[in-house]
C-alpha cells in the first residue's frame, strides 16, 4: 500500500493546508506536486519591489500603504508586472504578512489585472486570514462559476479547518463529493487538517486509508498529517511504523524526521529524538534556512548544547550572511539551555552585523537579564531601545509580566500608562496578560489601582466585560462603592454576565445611600421626593424590608407621595409580601395616586410569582376601566399568565390587542411569546415569533436577545439556526467562557454530543481562564449517553492539566452512579465532594438513604465509616446515620467503640 502511495500527487497545490511552518515547508519543497511549474520572474525583476514594500513591515502601516507604494512605483516609471506583484504576495504570505499580501491583490483587482483560478484560491485564503471566515464565505459566494473549482472549494475547506469549524467543513466536503470534485490529494489533505485542527486526530488514519482506497496517492504532506495525528494521540509506535514503511519505498523529507523527533521530545525520549534529528540533517536542503532553525530548536529541547553549537556553525557555513531569524532562533536556543555567556556573545555578533534592526532579538536578551535578576541591565536596555525608537509590543509584554510577577504595581501601571504612546500600531494586548493583572489587583483589593488599570485598557481599546467584572468584584472586596461604574458600562455598551448585575447594583447602591446621607447630615440639604424614593430602593437592597418600613414611617407626610408609595409597593412585591402590598395599593387608590402602569405591573408580577393568575387578568381589566395604557412588561406578564392557564388563544389575543393599540413592544415580548409556543410544541409559530424578535434587535445594542435566540432555537432542535446565531454572537461580541457555556447548553438539548465536543475542544485550546462549568456540561452529556469512562477520563485529563472540579461535578457523578446502583463509584465522588474547600453542599435524605441501605444490606463496615466521615466533613450528619452504621457493625461482630466515639465528637445523640 505504501509503495503505491509514495507516488507523488499529479497536481500542484496552490493553497497549502495550514499546519505550521513545517507542514508548509513540506509542500514547498516537494517538486513532485507540481504538474506544471509556475512561471516566476528572475529574482532581480521583483526583489527591488519587495524590498521597497517590505520596508512597511518594520512599523505598522495604514491600510492603503501598499497601494500608495505601488502608485508611487508607477509614477517613477518603473516596470511593474503581474508576476512581480504575485511574487511579493507569496513572499509576504510565507512570512505571515497576510494583510500586506491581501492589499496587493486588492490593488491588482482594482486596476483590472485578471486573476487566474489559482490566484483566486490564494486570495480566498488571504481574505480568511485577514478578515475572517464570514468574509471568506462571502467572497466565495460572489465568485463567478468559472472560478468555483476544486482549488477554490478545497481552499474554503482549508479555511474552515483554520477556524476550527468542523461542521461547516464536513458539510462542504459532502457537497464536493456530490459534485465529484474530491479526486485530488489536496482535498483529502485539507479534510485531515480539519480533523487535526478540531481535535479529532482519531479520524485521520481512516481518512488516509480512504484516500488510497479511492485511488488517490498520498503525498509527503499526507504522511506528515498522519504522523502528527499519531503523535497527538500519544501513539508513537504507529508514527514509527509509518516512518519505517515510508523509508522502504521513498526518500523521507527532513521535516517528517523533525516531526517525529518532536513526538519523542514530548515523551522525553531524547536519545530517539536525536537519532531522528541526525536523519533529518542527512536529507535536509542545506540552503533551506528553516531546516537549520528546526534542528537548532529541537536540539535545544533535547538539552544538547554541543549539538546546538555545531548546527549553528554549519548554518553559518551554508550562508554568506545569517538572517535576523537565524540569530533569533539561536538566541532562544541558548536561553533555553541557560548558556548566558554564549547568549551575550551571539548577541554582540548580531549587533555588529545586522542590516535591519529587529527588536525581537534584544527582547530575548532583556528576558534573559530579567530571568537572571539583572533588572538594572534589562531596564537600561529598555531605555536605550526607547531612545532609538526600537521599543515594541513584545518589550512591553515582557516588562509588564515581570513587574507583575515581582508585585511592582506602580512600575507596572506606569508601563501601561505609557503603552499607548510607546507601542505603535493597532495592537491588542494578550488576554492572558490582562487577566493576570486583573487577578492580581482583585486579590490585592486595590480599587484605585484597578481603576487606573481599567483606564489604561480603555486607552488601548481593550476594556471589556471581564475587566469591568473584575473592577466590580474589587470594589466589593474592598468594601467600597462607585456609582459611576454602571453608567460607564452602559456608555461603553459592555454586556456583563447576568450574575454580575446584582453585584453591580450593590456597588452602585451602597454608595448612593452614603451620598444621600452626606447630603442630609453633613450639608443640611433637603432631598427631593424622587430621591426619597430612590433611597427607599437602596435601603431595601442593602438592609432589607424592615429598614424600608422604618424609613418610610419617618418620612414627613409631604414626602409620602406617589413616588415613595410606589417604591414601597415595589419593595413589598419584591419581598412577596402580598397582604402588605395590596394594602399599600389600596392606600394609593384612596389617596388618588395609583394611576399609572408601574404600580399595576408590580402587583401583576407579585401575583405571577405567587401563582395567582386570575388576579393578574383582573388587574388588566382594571387597567382598561381606569384607561391606563399597558406597556411591554404588561404584555409579557399577561401572555405568561394565559400560558400558565394553558390558554394559547388568549395569549395570541393579548399580543394582537397590544399591537392594535400601538403599544411599543420590544424584543422581550416576542421572546416570551416564542417561549410559550416552544413549551406548547407549536414549532412553526415559535420560529415565526423568533424571526420577529430578531427583526427588532440592533445587532450592536446588546447580547442578551441573541442568548435567548440561541436557547430557544435549541429548544426547537433547530441546529442550523443555533449555529447561525452562534456565528452572529462570535462575530459581533467578544467570545468569553460564558459564550461557549451557552452554546454547549444549547447543543445539549437537541443531544448533539459530537458538536458539543467540537465546541468544547476548541474552547479548551484557546481559553485563558479555566471554567469548570464547561467541562461539567460535557460530563453531563457523556453521562447521559452512558459514557461513564469518557466522563471520568475527561476529568482525569483536566486535573492532569492543573484544573479541578467543583461541587456541581461531584453532584453530576453522584446522581448518575446512584441512579444506576453503583454505590461504590458514588462513594468515591462523595469523598471528592467532602474534600472541596468552602463547601456548603448538603446530601439530601433520599440519597443518604440509598447509601445507608446499601451499607446495611452488604454489611460494608468500611464503606459505612467512610460515608460517615464524609457526612461529618460536609456537616450533614445525624443520629439515624450512626444507628445505621452500628447496624452494619453488629452482624459482623465488630466493636462499635469507634462509632460511639465519632458520635461523641460530632455531638450526635443516638439514644
Image (cartoon, helix red, strand yellow):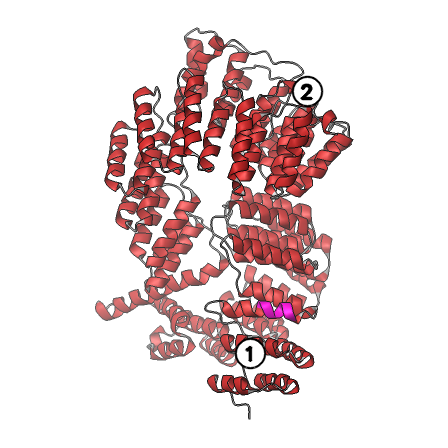
Dots 1 and 2: beta carbons under 8 Å?
no
Disc 1 element: helix
Q: Quadrant of the N terminus?
A: top right
Q: Which residue is mark 2?
A: 11
Compute the Cα span from label 1 to label 2: 70 Å
Q: Quadrant of the C terminus?
A: bottom right
When asked about the image quadrant of residue 567, the answer is bottom left
| Nearest the eye: 279 or 871 | 279
| Nearest the eye: 828 or 333 | 333
Side of 129 where 418 appears, left or right:
left
Disc 2 element: loop
* Vertical comparison of 203 with 749: above or below: above
Side of 289 where 172 appears, left or right:
right
Label of residue 868 in the image = 1
Residue 301 visible? The answer is: yes
* 759 in magenta: no
| Nearest the eye: 450 or 484 | 450
Question: Which of pointers 1 and 2 lies earlier in the amino acid sequence?
Answer: 2
Residue 661 visible? The answer is: no
Q: Which residues, given as a range, are shown in magenta?
A: 824-829
* 828 in magenta: yes
Q: Please, which residue is most extreme toward the bottom here?
A: 911
Amino acid at each position: 500500500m505504501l509503495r503505491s502511495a509514495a507516488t507523488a500527487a499529479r497536481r500542484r497545490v496552490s493553497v497549502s493546508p495550514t499546519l505550521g511552518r513545517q507542514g508548509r515547508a513540506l509542500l514547498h519543497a516537494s517538486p513532485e506536486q507540481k504538474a506544471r511549474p509556475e512561471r516566476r520572474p528572475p529574482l532581480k525583476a521583483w526583489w527591488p519591489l519587495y524590498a521597497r514594500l517590505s520596508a512597511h513591515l518594520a512599523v505598522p502601516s495604514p491600510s492603503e500603504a501598499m497601494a500608495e507604494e505601488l502608485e508611487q512605483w508607477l509614477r517613477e516609471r518603473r516596470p511593474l508586472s503581474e508576476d512581480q506583484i504575485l511574487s511579493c504576495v507569496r513572499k509576504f504570505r510565507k512570512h505571515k504578512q497576510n494583510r500586506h499580501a491581501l492589499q496587493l491583490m486588492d490593488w491588482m483587482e482594482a486596476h483590472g489585472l485578471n486573476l487566474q483560478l489559482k490566484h483566486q484560491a490564494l486570495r480566498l485564503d488571504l481574505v480568511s486570514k485577514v478578515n475572517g471566515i464570514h468574509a471568506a464565505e462571502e467572497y466565495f459566494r460572489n465568485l463567478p462559476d468559472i472560478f468555483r473549482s476544486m482549488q477554490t472549494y478545497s481552499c474554503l475547506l482549508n479555511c474552515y479547518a483554520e477556524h476550527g469549524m468542523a461542521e461547516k467543513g464536513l458539510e462542504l466536503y459532502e457537497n464536493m463529493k456530490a459534485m465529484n470534485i474530491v479526486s485530488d490529494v489536496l482535498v483529502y489533505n485539507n479534510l485531515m487538517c480539519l480533523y487535526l485542527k478540531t481535535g479529532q486526530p482519531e479520524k485521520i488514519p481512516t481518512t488516509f486509508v480512504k484516500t488510497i482506497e479511492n485511488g488517490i496517492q498520498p503525498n509527503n504532506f499526507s504522511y506528515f498529517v498522519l504522523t502528527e495525528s499519531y503523535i497527538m494521540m500519544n501513539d508513537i509506535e504507529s508514527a514509527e511504523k509509518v516512518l519505517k514503511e515510508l523509508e522502504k519505498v521513498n526518500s523521507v523529507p527532513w521535516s517528517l524526521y523533525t516531526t517525529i523527533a518532536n513526538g519523542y521530545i514530548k515523551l522525553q525520549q531524547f536519545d530517539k529524538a536525536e537519532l531522528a534529528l541526525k536523519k533529518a540533517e542527512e536529507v535536509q536542503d542545506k540552503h533551506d534556512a528553516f531546516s537549520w532553525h528546526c534542528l537548532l530548536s529541537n536540539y535545544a529541547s533535547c538539552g544538547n548544547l554541543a549539538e546546538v553549537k555545531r548546527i549553528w556553525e554549519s548554518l553559518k557555513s551554508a550562508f554568506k550572511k545569517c538572517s535576523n531569524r537565524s540569530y533569533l532562533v539561536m538566541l532562544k536556543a541558548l536561553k533555553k539551555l541557560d548558556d548566558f555567556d554564549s547568549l551575550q556573545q551571539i548577541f554582540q555578533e548580531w549587533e555588529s552585523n545586522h542590516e535591519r534592526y529587529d527588536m525581537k532579538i534584544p527582547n530575548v536578551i532583556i528576558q534573559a537579564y530579567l530571568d537572571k535578576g539583572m533588572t538594572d541591565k534589562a531596564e537600561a536596555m529598555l531605555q536605550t531601545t526607547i531612545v532609538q525608537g526600537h521599543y515594541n509590543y513584545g518589550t512591553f509584554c515582557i516588562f509588564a509580566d515581570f513587574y507583575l510577577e515581582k508585585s511592582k504595581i506602580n512600575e507596572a501601571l506606569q508601563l501601561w500608562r505609557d503603552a499607548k504612546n510607546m507601542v505603535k500600531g493597532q495592537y491588542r494586548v494578550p488576554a492572558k496578560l490582562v487577566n493576570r493583572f486583573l487577578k492580581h489587583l482583585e486579590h490585592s483589593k486595590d480599587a484605585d489601582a484597578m481603576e487606573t488599570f481599567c483606564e489604561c485598557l480603555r486607552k488601548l481599546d481593550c476594556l471589556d466585560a471581564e475587566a469591568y467584572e473584575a473592577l466590580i468584584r474589587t470594589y466589593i472586596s474592598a468594601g467600597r462603592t462607585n456609582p459611576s461604574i454602571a453608567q460607564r458600562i452602559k456608555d461603553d455598551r459592555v454586556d456583563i454576565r447576568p450574575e454580575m448585575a446584582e453585584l453591580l447594583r450593590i456597588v452602585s447602591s451602597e454608595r448612593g445611600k452614603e451620598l444621600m446621607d452626606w447630603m442630609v447630615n453633613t450639608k443640611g440639604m433637603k432631598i427631593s421626593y424622587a430621591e426619597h424614593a430612590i433611597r427607599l430602593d437602596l435601603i431595601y437592597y442593602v438592609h432589607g424590608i424592615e429598614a424600608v418600613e422604618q424609613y418610610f414611617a419617618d418620612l414627613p407626610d409631604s414626602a409620602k407621595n406617589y413616588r415613595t408609595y410606589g417604591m414601597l409597593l415595589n419593595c413589598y412585591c419584591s419581598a412577596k409580601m402580598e397582604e402588605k402590598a395590596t394594602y399599600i395599593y389600596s392606600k394609593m387608590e384612596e389617596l388618588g395616586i395609583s394611576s399609572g402602569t408601574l404600580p399595576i405591573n408590580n402587583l401583576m408580577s407579585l401575583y405571577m410569582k405567587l401563582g395567582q393568575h386570575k388576579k393578574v387578568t383582573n388587574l388588566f381589566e382594571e387597567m382598561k376601566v381606569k384607561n391606563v395604557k399597558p406597556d411591554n412588561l404588561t404584555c409579557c406578564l399577561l401572555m405568561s399568565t394565559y400560558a400558565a392557564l394553558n390558554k394559547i388563544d388568549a395569549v395570541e389575543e393579548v399580543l394582537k390587542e397590544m399591537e392594535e393599540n400601538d403599544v411599543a413592544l420590544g424584543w422581550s415580548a416576542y421572546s416570551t411569546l416564542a417561549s410559550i409556543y416552544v413549551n406548547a410544541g407549536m414549532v412553526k409559530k415559535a420560529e415565526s415569533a423568533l424571526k420577529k424578535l430578531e427583526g427588532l434587535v440592533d445587532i450592536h445594542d446588546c447580547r442578551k436577545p441573541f442568548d435567548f435566540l440561541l436557547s430557544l432555537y435549541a429548544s426547537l432542535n433547530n441546529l442550523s439556526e443555533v449555529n447561525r446565531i452562534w456565528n452572529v454572537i462570535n462575530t459581533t461580541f467578544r467570545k468569553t467562557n460564558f459564550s461557549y457555556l451557552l452554546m454547549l447548553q444549547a447543543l445539549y438539548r437537541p443531544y448533539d454530543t459530537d458538536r458539543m465536543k467540537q465546541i468544547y475542544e476548541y474552547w479548551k485550546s484557546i481559553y485563558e481562564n479555566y471554567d469548570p462549568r464547561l467541562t461539567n456540561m460535557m460530563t453531563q452529556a457523556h453521562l447521559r449517553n452512558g459514557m461513564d469512562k469518557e466522563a471520568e477520563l475527561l476529568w482525569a485529563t483536566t486535573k492532569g492539566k492543573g484544573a479541578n472540579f467543583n461541587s456541581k461535578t461531584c453532584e453530576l457523578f453522584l446522581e448518575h452512579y446512584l441512579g444506576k446502583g453503583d454505590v461504590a463509584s458514588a462513594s468515591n465522588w462523595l469523598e471528592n465532594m467532602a474534600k472541596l474547600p468552602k463547601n456548603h453542599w448538603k446530601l439530601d435524605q433520599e440519597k443518604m438513604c440509598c447509601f445507608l441501605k446499601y451499607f446495611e444490606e452488604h454489611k460494608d463496615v468500611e464503606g459505612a465509616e467512610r460515608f460517615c466521615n464524609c457526612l461529618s466533613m460536609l456537616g450533614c450528619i445525624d443520629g439515624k446515620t450512626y444507628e445505621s452504621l452500628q447496624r452494619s457493625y453488629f452482624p459482623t461482630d465488630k466493636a462499635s467503640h469507634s462509632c460511639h466515639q465519632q458520635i461523641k465528637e460530632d455531638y450526635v445523640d443516638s439514644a
